[in-house]
Image: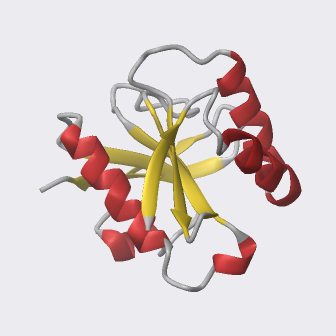
Amino acid sequence: MKFEIITKNSKLTPELLNILQAEWSKAYGWLTDVIDDWSLTDFPQIVVATENNKIIGYYSLVARELVKDNHDYTPWLGTLFIRKEYRNKHFSPILLEDACRHVKDMGYENLFLATEHIQFYEKFGFEEIGLGLYLWGAPTKFYKKTLK
C-alpha cells in the first residue's frame, strides 16, 4: 500500500473528491473547504492510501477537532475513511498505523480523536480520556493514543 499526502494540485485530489461526493457527502464538503483554504501549515493534512493505483481510503490530521472542550490537545485524527468496496478487509488498521507513524515523525507524542464509534478505536490502542460534544451538539468520546 502506498500513502501520499495530497495537496490542492495533487493528481489524486479530483478522484478523492468524486469518491467522497458519492460515498460520504459530509467529508466531501469539509474537504472542498480545506482545498479552497489550503495553506502551507502543518495541518490539515490529508493522506490518501492507494493499492494498485486505486484509492482505498484516506485519513486526515487536524490541529483542532470540532469539539466544545479539550482544544488544548493536538493533533487529532480528523477522519478515517475506507471506500465501501474495501471495508471489512482490514485496511483501517493499516491507515491508523500510518497516521500514528506520520504524527510521531512530526514530533508529537500523542494522537487524539473524537468519535461516536465505540469499541472500534480501542482495538488499535486508543484509550478513552473523556466525554464531550461536537460543535453541533452531538455527543462524542475523546480518545488518545500514546505513540511509541
- Left or right of 115? Residue 107 is left
Q: Position of residue 19 (x, y in %)?
A: 78, 55
- Left or right of 55? Residue 126 is left
Q: Quadrant of residue 145?
A: bottom left
Residue 127 at least partly seen: no
Quick one: 58 or 121, which is closer to the camera? 58
- Colouring convention used in this rendered image of the protein: secondary structure
Q: Looking at the rendering, in which quadrant would you find the N terminus?
A: bottom left
Q: In the image, what residue occupies the spot 47% across and 75% down? A: 119
Q: In the image, what residue occupies the spot 53% across and 14% down? A: 39
> Which residue is the extreme one toward the bottom?
89
Q: Position of residue 79 (x, y in %)?
A: 57, 49
- Left or right of 70? Residue 86 is right
- Vertically, is 15 above or below 133? below
> Which residue is the extreme one toward the left?
148
Q: Position of residue 24 (x, y in %)?
A: 79, 55
Quick one: 42 or 126, which is closer to the camera? 42
Q: In the image, what residue occupies the spot 62% across and 49% down? A: 139
Residue 40 at least partly seen: yes
Quick one: 145 or 108, which is closer to the camera? 108
